[in-house]
Amino acid sequence: MKERNKRVLVGMSGGIDSTATCLMLQEQGYEIVGVTMRVWGDEPQDARELAARMGIEHYVADERIPFKETIVKNFIDEYKQGRTPNPCVMCNPLFKFRVLAEWADKLDCAYIATGHYSRLEERSGHIYIVAGDDDKKDQSYFLWRLGQDILKRCIFPLGDYTKIKVREYLAEKGYEAKSKEGESMEVCFIQGDYRDFLREQCPELDTEIGPGWFVNSEGVKLGQHKGAPYYTIGQRKGLEIALGKPAYVLKINPQKNTVMLGDAEQLQTEYMLAEQDRIVDEQELFSCENLAVRIRYRSRPIPCRVKRLEDGRLLVRFLETASAVAPGQSAVFYDGRRVLGGAFIASQRGIGLVIIENKDKL
């Protein structure tokens, strides 16, 4: 009978990181089972060949239809609603780790492993996600929605490595060609500009929504744009409008199909609303003296304070300058390198009144 507590199901893409993950776990004495999720594009031939070379069981989970109906549909819908989505944040709990857990149960594997550059830490009965050692590759930002049940089963072998060290490790183990491969795409189902992807997947978008107006903060029309879904908060390049000075996207109104432009100073804010949160320990979050928040991937953590509102949303007060707060993106809260939780940045409509009512409580 197979020893279940030594069987690990590894999410295998066939890339550098998942290959290194398999090899490292094999060295540690685990029995590896590889599963490749086919969600977009070609057959996962690389993963099959690597699994055969390493002598491990390998399976392919064809998830193309449900992936398109959930993750890709959400991605398109979010842009239609004037929000800026992060598909990896949606995919990890709803798709990737859910599917891996199902396969792990089916194949009698106690653990799940992936090539994420993050670490895990157990403290006071909770499992916390911790930023990986490689600041340039750290993926803790994308994992905040994972629940405790999943995290208790997870192993992230690459959390203590830099990408350079992972490449060196593969070369030392005889996988030199693999070690020299390029980086994977930031969004696995998009090659190039997301706007081209929207047009390809939603050909009716240009006629359904069509051109609209750029406006200033007073509602004065400045010129036409190509359609609200093609713009994001903080965008400066590609606006194709000459105003005699740098202009940035301040707000997007999908109902009116308008895009508000202004200067960099107008992008700055002291407060932010967030919703649909997942917090490890609320008492710890609200009392943390070193609390900081990332409002986009690779952005610097900004010191902050957080309060729970009566309607369930979070009011965040930035203690340093924050700029280009984009609804739809994730706000991920850190105590040093440890993730305390996260939430989706909400529409900021009506925030003025909320600030007045709660200013003295933050």
Image (tube, rainbow, N blue to C red):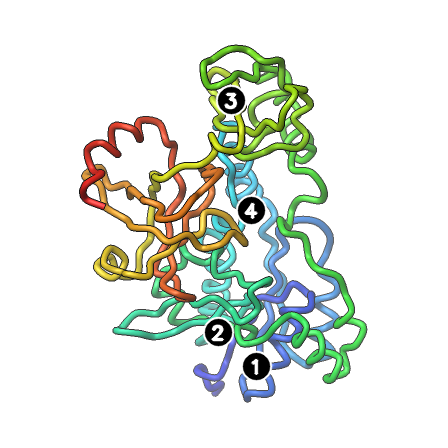
Taking the image as shown, residue 93 lies to the left or right of residue 249, namely left
Q: Nearer the viewer, residue 215 or 149?
A: 215
Residue sitting at the far top: 220
Please give the name of the residue rendered at 34% of the width and 39% of the height, measured from the top-left corner. 271
**Is mark 4 in CB contact (under 8 Å) with mark 3?**
no
Distance from label 3 to label 1 (Cα)?
A: 51 Å
Disc 3 marks a residue whose amino acid type is Met
Question: Disc 3 or 2, which lies upstream in sequence?
Answer: 2
Judged from the image, the secondary structure of the residue bearing numbered disc 4 is helix
Report x, y in % for residue 217: 46, 19
**Is mark 1 in CB contact (under 8 Å) with mark 2?**
yes
Disc 4 marks a residue whose amino acid type is Phe
Question: Disc 4 or 3, which lies upstream in sequence?
Answer: 4
Height in image: 23 above or below 197?
below
Please give the name of the residue rendered at 74% of the width and 84% of the height, measured from the top-left corner. 172
- Mark 2, other Cα within 10 Å: few <14 / some 14–19 / many ≥20: many
Question: Disc 1 or 4, which lies upstream in sequence?
Answer: 1
In the image, which disc is placed on residue 260?
Answer: 3
Disc 1 marks a residue whose amino acid type is Leu
In the image, which disc is placed on residue 155?
Answer: 2
Please give the name of the residue rendered at 48% of the width and 33% of the height, measured from the top-left corner. 267
Residue holding disc 4: 67
Please give the name of the residue rendered at 66% of the width and 33% of the height, measured from the top-left corner. 237
In this rendering, the label closer to the viewer, 4 or 3: 3
- Mark 3, other Cα within 10 Å: few <14 / some 14–19 / many ≥20: many
Question: Disc 4 or 2, which lies upstream in sequence?
Answer: 4
